[in-house]
Image (tube, rainbow, N blue to C red):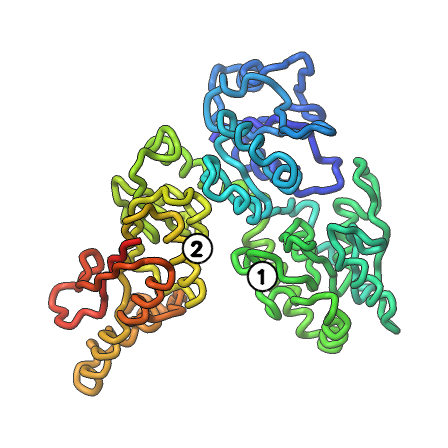
Amino acid sequence: MRILIVGVNLSDYLAKCHEAFRTGLRTMFGARCFGRGYPNFDPTLRRYPEIVRHCFPDGTEPDLILTDWDIPPGNKEATLPYDGIGDTPGLKAMVFGDYWQVTENFQEAFIKFIEPRVDLLLCYFPQAGSYFSGTSIASRFHTMFSSFDPTIFNDHHQTQQYDVGFLAAGSQSPDPFYPERHRIHQKLQAMSGLRYFSAPHPGWQRRQEHPLVGIGFSRAINSCRMFVTTGSHRRHLHAKYVEALASHTVLLADAPESAERFGLRDGHNYIQCNEHDIVDKVHYYLDRPELCNAIADAGYQLAISRHTCFHRAAELLDIVARARRQRQRYPSWPPAEPLRLHLGCGQDYWPGYINIDSDPASKADIVCDMREVSRYFAAQSVQEIAVIPALNYLRLWEAQQLFCDFARILRPAGRLIIETVDVEKAAEKVTLSAGNRFDDYLEGIRNFHAFGLDTIQRRESYLPNHMSWSRDHLTKELNVAGFKIVHIMEPQVHVPPPGVLRWRDMRVEAIR
């Protein structure tokens, strides 16, 4: 993939995650960079087409332009560093970091700015897309958590001369964006006998040589048995989370939004804490050094195996491939009405539907968790939604919220189709088969857990069911959510294989 990065070189910037992502793209795809601080920068060029010709003198064209953007001081709008981006080929993308500057000041103007210029918004924080739920640019948001350059953040094998480290904005002095940090700092500072390391924030000016920036920051983290950070009042999973893990220490942190999606597991690869229990947690884990070592090892493996800048580059490749498919199928987004959604599509692509799945390897037009689907579509904009057969993977309260979301985005008289296991049929299959037909019994019992027989034979991990449904219960929940007409029938898609007499599934069609 040919990539052109347009923006200022950020290698000497305090926050290393920005240039880390570009490093991954340069290493994996040979991405070419244009901007102040990069080789071959020409300050006389003023338009994107000129920059493309300058960076691709052989006449080839980039598949993707990843461009900087800016909000001039005092302005209520965004700008690009150059003109003419619409006259360039390929997809255009921006990294969308501090989204609150937009959502608190000029959200509508931002939508108008993005619509004709940018195809992909790569967001460090999953919260960003929720502010644009149901807008014309909702499908352009893609969560891409902060990553790290392993040549900077890694296990530097420092002597652990500190028990706890806390190096962050808002720790030494109060900060309204991180109100919890100073209170945590004060409690740690007051702990008797604790080898505690904290220091003033180095400031946001570019300081390549500061001892607590870059590799120096990683070495400082690495010298602490445990390292603290928090996600602010917005519960952000910011760069310090992954940088601490990558520096091979025990991460002590509050639970950010999307912790599970990122891979954080309390007590396994990090320790969840807050300003109220931080002292107790520190005492508990310092008294258990072997447990601390195991958690630090697991956190380090999480970072190295899933969150380097090279993993993010590979994720971008998938995002671009999906965007191309979406552009081919729907040249103008959103697609022509009536909109029909196929949730949990997997490899079963339905023509005429917008196919949605959380698995990047699926044939989906939009890759997202179906619990987030309502943010892509405006109220009363969808004619039909099919969920086959993914409902059982949701917890009860998640399904209840999803039904309400469906009712909001469906048109009046819009149709919801669900095919899922009927718990009464599955129980009957188990009861009638027990003791005389083991294969039939196992076929029934597995529907409470969602494992496949081939999965068991291969001893593979599987995603278990979180909820089972009866016809009466599902009807009741749909009625509460606003579906007034509910029909129960035999499945039409998830049908029994040949020779199976008692099938466990049901089909529900509900009208808003």
In this view, the residue in front, 512 or 217, is 512
Q: Position of residue 377 (x, y in %)?
A: 41, 43
Q: Is residue 363 visible?
A: no
The residue at the point 46 percent across, 21 percent down is: 89
Residue 363 figure quarter: top left
Does 179 sit left or right of 476 as displayed? right
Q: Check disc 2 and report the residue beneath it.
A: 371
Camera-side residue of 94 and 78: 78
From this view, report whether residue 498 is shown above or below residue 12. Answer: below
Disc on the earlier residue, 2 or 1:
1
Name above or below for residue 458 compared with residue 424: above
Residue furthest out toward the bottom: 435
Q: Amino acid at mark 1?
A: Leu
Mark 2 to mark 1: distance in Å? 20 Å
Image disc number at residue 215 = none
What residue is drawn where x is 88% and y is 73%? 192
Q: Is residue 148 visible?
A: yes
Does residue 215 sit above or below 64 in this rendering? Answer: below
Mark 2 closeness class: few <14, some 14–19, many ≥20 residues within 10 Å: some
For label 1, count other residues whose C-alpha is less than 10 Å away and answer few (under 14), some (14-19) or many (20+): many
Is residue 283 shown left or right of residue 376?
right
The residue singled out by tag 1 in the image is 264
Residue 386 in picture, x, y percent from top left = 29, 52
The three-letter code of the residue at mark 2 reads Arg
